[in-house]
Image (spheres, helix red, strand yellow):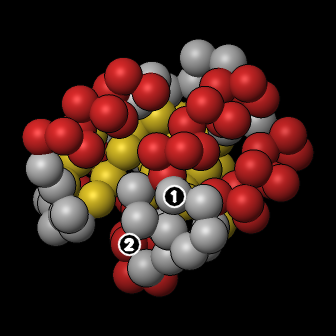
Amino acid sequence: MSKLLVVDDEQSICWGLSKLGESIGHDVAVASSAEEALEAVDEVRPDLIVLDVRLPGMDGLSAIEQFRQRVGQVPIIVITAYGDLETAVEAVRNGAFEYIVKPFDLDTVQ
């Protein structure tokens, strides 16, 4: 069973992505900040990370490099409500696998 780590400070996003992940057979862990996710990542050992850009404390783009150091090349999908070309380019340069702008259709994430 694959493991999904959802990192977002919006409870509704975490809930929706958790339900989606569970419905297709994934174990899902949720964190509301990058710091919380980085503390949990060694235990969770995710196969996929869904990471918001704007988080309390460390932002998602800054966290990508730290995730890379801890979990290697695990795919990271970056999500944001504040999408612009500059942020998308930075996310991909930092190692994001995909960049999705909120609001999004859950089928897009699936």
Image-based side of 56 in relation to 35, left or right: left
- Vertical position of residue 50 compared to residue 46: above or below: below
Name the residue carrying label 1.
59
Marks 1, 2: nearer the viewer: 1
Residue ranking furthest to the top: 73
Considering depth in this image, is 7 or 89 the residue closer to the camera?
Answer: 89
- Vertical position of residue 91 compared to residue 53: above or below: above
Image-based side of 11 in relation to 80, left or right: right
Q: Residues within 10 Å of mark 1 (few under 14, many from 20)?
A: some
The mark nearer the N terminus, 1 or 2, is 2
Residue 13, numbered circle: 2
Asked if residue 22 shows in the view, the reply is no
Q: Amino acid at mark 1?
A: Asp
* Image spot of residue 75 (x, y percent): 49, 27
Considering depth in this image, is 88 or 74 the residue closer to the camera?
Answer: 88
Q: Secondary structure at mark 2?
A: helix
